[in-house]
């Protein structure tokens, strides 16, 4: 029996729900970086370039960790095939929890260098989780619905990023700030110890749940650089670099962007609620993507389920953010536009990816050229069209890799380095030319993603036709 047939015949609901809880938690903690950047910028009197070292250290850890993993896999064989996905996931959680704990000494010594070190360790933990958990979710069912499953788990990851600016901002800017309202390094101590505790509780839960074993048993351990023979994987690595770089850069600058006098002239306390809308848009789009890319549903059911999901998630966001309905009603326009883009994409991951990237190019140019609410709406609307990009790029890049899937996965995760590099370049441009003009950097990122989607539409279509021809279909 093939792996795909086995996947269809087994029920993976419990493992999928358990892993989804993990996605939520690491989304929450990752988005806390967007709160830390303006906080540490003021605390240590940093330039935009220096404050972007937060993302450089955090996402730079993804590159270092993935490079180590890839080199081990090429010489010793895939580590996950040896120890299993469950142990790999637990190791990643423990490493991330250690990174959170290290915020305590960083805050005690009020050292920016120690904060960056803690973020690096935290990033290493999430690197292991990205390599193991994403590949694991893609295996929990048939290959043709892998994008749908990843969009669903990424939707809960986005739920964490939606809550983080409001809850995390309240913890650091208000609840644990100094009595006189001034910024203090000590405000990060308790929040990150709480995050460490929750991560360890999730690890305990995962250790008690029976997860399916996808280890390679009795088969040849794959060594060498075989994954690099696949051109779509290499292009996918570049596209992932650009996606994570673009998404992180935009999210990192939203608070500073909304502070600009020519945009909205808002304070950090108010801006954090709009930052939640950016990440909340990603959550809406990922739930819609999970439904749209599910090939087992009819068009009528897809439309009905997508309407229900959009309404439900919009109400959740409205209940989370400290904004009136009038202040967030503009988001309904983006939801409607998102619906149209999904149906034009016709449930094809590559085509949908190109369409969403094209929309984001237009929105970024609008944010650069306009002022006031129009500029704000444009930048916040990018989140909902970022939604399916990670899962679609990931599954397109590793599609058809077979025994090289885990090795290919480590290369794609290595490309998360974009989250370290792109914000640094945008930070430099922001210091020289201003925040608004610095968004030209993400524009180029989304153009690359658009081209990758178009390439995969053509390339993978030909691969499928060749496979069908060989099988006699």
Image (cartoon, grey):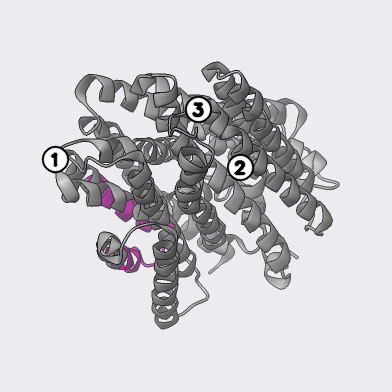
Q: Earlier in the sequence, mark 1 or mark 2?
A: 2
Q: Which residue is mark 3?
A: 184
- Magenta segment includes 452: no
Report the side of 303 relative to 366 (left or right): right
Q: Is residue 225 visible?
A: no
Could you tell me what secondary structure mostly forms the magenta stretch? helix
The answer to whether 360 is drawn above or below residue 416 in the figure is below
Residue drawn where x is 37% and y is 38% of the image: 246
Q: CA distance from mark 1 to mark 2?
A: 36 Å
The answer to whether 36 is drawn above or below residue 455 in the figure is above
Q: Which residue is mark 1?
A: 369
Q: Which mark is residue 130?
A: 2
Q: Position of residue 69 (x, y in %)?
A: 67, 30
Q: Position of residue 290 (x, y in %)?
A: 49, 65
The answer to whether 92 is drawn above or below residue 41 in the figure is below
Residue drawn where x is 69% and y is 48% of the image: 198
Which of the image's four quarters has the N terminus?
Answer: bottom right
């Amino acid at each position: 029996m093939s792996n795909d047939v086995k996947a269809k015949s087994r029920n993976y609901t419990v493992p999928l729900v358990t892993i989804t809880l993990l996605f939520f938690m690491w989304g929450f903690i990752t988005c806390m970086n967007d709160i830390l950047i303006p906080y540490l910028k003021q605390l240590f009197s940093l330039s935009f370039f220096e404050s972007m070292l937060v993302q450089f250290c955090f996402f730079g850890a993804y590159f270092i960790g993935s490079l180590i993993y890839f080199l081990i896999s090429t010489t010793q064989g895939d580590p996950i095939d040896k120890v299993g996905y469950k142990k790999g996931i637990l190791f990643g959680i423990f490493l991330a929890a250690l990174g959170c704990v290290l915020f305590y000494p960083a805050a005690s010594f009020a050292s920016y260098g120690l904060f960056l070190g803690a973020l690096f360790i935290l990033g290493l933990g999430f690197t292991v989780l990205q390599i193991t958990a994403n590949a694991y979710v893609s295996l929990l069912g048939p290959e043709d619905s892998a994008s749908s499953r990843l969009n669903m788990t990424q939707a809960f990851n986005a739920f964490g990023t939606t809550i983080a600016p409001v809850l995390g901002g309240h913890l650091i800017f208000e609840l644990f700030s100094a009595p006189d309202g001034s910024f203090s390094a000590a405000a990060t101590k308790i929040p990150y110890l709480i995050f460490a505790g929750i991560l360890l509780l999730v690890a305990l839960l995962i250790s008690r749940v029976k997860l399916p074993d996808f280890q390679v048993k009795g088969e040849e351990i794959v060594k060498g650089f075989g994954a690099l023979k696949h051109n779509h994987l290499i292009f996918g690595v570049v596209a992932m670099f650009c996606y994570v770089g673009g998404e992180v850069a935009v999210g990192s600058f939203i608070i500073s962007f909304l502070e600009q006098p020519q945009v909205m002239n808002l304070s950090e306390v108010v801006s954090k609620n709009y930052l939640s809308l950016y990440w909340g848009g990603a959550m809406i789009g990922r739930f819609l993507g999970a439904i749209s890319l599910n090939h087992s549903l009819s068009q009528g059911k897809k439309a009905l389920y997508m309407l229900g999901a959009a309404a439900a998630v919009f109400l959740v966001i409205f209940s989370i953010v400290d904004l009136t309905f009038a202040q967030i009603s503009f988001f309904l326009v983006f939801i409607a536009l998102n619906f149209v883009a999904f149906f034009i994409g016709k449930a094809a991951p590559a085509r949908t990816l190109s369409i969403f990237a094209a929309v984001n190019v237009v929105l970024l140019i609008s944010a650069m050229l306009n002022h006031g609410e129009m500029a704000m709406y444009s930048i916040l609307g990018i989140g909902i069209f970022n939604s399916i990009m990670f899962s679609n790029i990931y599954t397109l890049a590793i599609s058809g890799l077979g025994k090289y899937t885990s090795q290919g996965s480590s290369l794609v995760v290595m490309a998360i380095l974009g989250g370290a590099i792109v914000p640094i370049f945008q930070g430099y441009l922001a210091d020289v030319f201003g925040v608004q003009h610095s968004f030209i950097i993400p524009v180029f990122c989304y153009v690359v993603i658009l081209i990758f989607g178009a390439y995969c539409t053509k390339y993978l279509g030909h691969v499928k036709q060749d496979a069908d021809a060989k099988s006699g279909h």
